[in-house]
Amino acid sequence: MQVLLVEDNHLLASGISQALRAAGFIVNHVSRGNDALTAIKTSQPDIVILDLGLPDMDGMAVLRSARQDRFLNPVLILTARDTTFDKVSGLDSGADDYLAKPFEIDELLARLRALERRLGGSKSNDLVIGPVCLDTKTLEVTVNNEPLGMSRREYMLLKALMESPNKVQTRDMLDSKLYGWGEEVSSNAVEVHIHNLRKKLPDGFIRTVRGVGYVVKSTT
């Protein structure tokens, strides 16, 4: 799940990014509103975390512009503006959630998981396909209730596939869900992770669509 963090406090942004990456999110960070609008148009993040007090334009203007450009993915406002008027204005302008600063990182993560569930049409933290269960809260994966040891990238790749069952995803699509901007990515990184996952998962769980990409079927 790719998150765009729009926050001009670099120390706070660094702390949030570190916590989100540890929780299995890919985080890209910008500190200006115009850069946020460019990133939203070009990379189509799954979720946007948006500060309102940006140096070049108000975050509310960023939100309204993104919605006018038909960006439909969730936006969570994260700001020091904590009046009821501010919250109502943010939600009425198209935000999906509103969290005031100061905040606890656990609450931010819980709200992001809720937005994830909304994106995937799920009411649970568990992604379950056949004997495979992935818990987005504990970051644990089990097969027939037996836990699997898994690297962070393997977990993120499996999560990306299980979030969109029956949808074929190309290598470029999966790369964007595994690596942030500026990270060095080897040309066969996805293939290596797929190979390692297949050794741990039931036979045929991850299928190759030759010349296109990979898919997990909802019934395997």
Image (cartoon, rainbow, N blue to C red):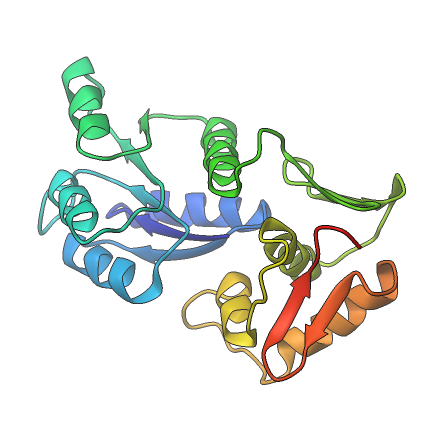
Quarter of the image for residue 38 reads: bottom left
Q: Where is residue 53 in the image (x, y as percent from the top left)?
A: 16, 39
Q: Which residue is drawn at 58% across and 60% down?
A: 167
Q: Where is residue 29 in the image (x, y as percent from the top left)?
A: 34, 56
Q: Residue at x 61, y 75 (%)?
A: 213
State the residue in front, 53 or 15.
53
The furthest residue to the top: 84
Locate the C terminus by quadrant. Answer: bottom right
Q: In this view, does 12 lie to the left or right of 139?
A: left
Q: Which residue is drawn at 23% across and 56% down?
A: 36
Q: Where is residue 58 in the image (x, y as percent from the top left)?
A: 11, 42
State the residue in front, 15 or 218.
218
Q: Is residue 91 left or right of residue 207?
A: left
Q: How many marks?
A: 0
Vertical side of 114 occupied by 192: above or below: below
Q: Position of residue 26 (x, y in %)?
A: 49, 56
Vertical side of 194 occupied by 53: above or below: above
Q: Which residue is drawn at 51% across and 66% down?
A: 179
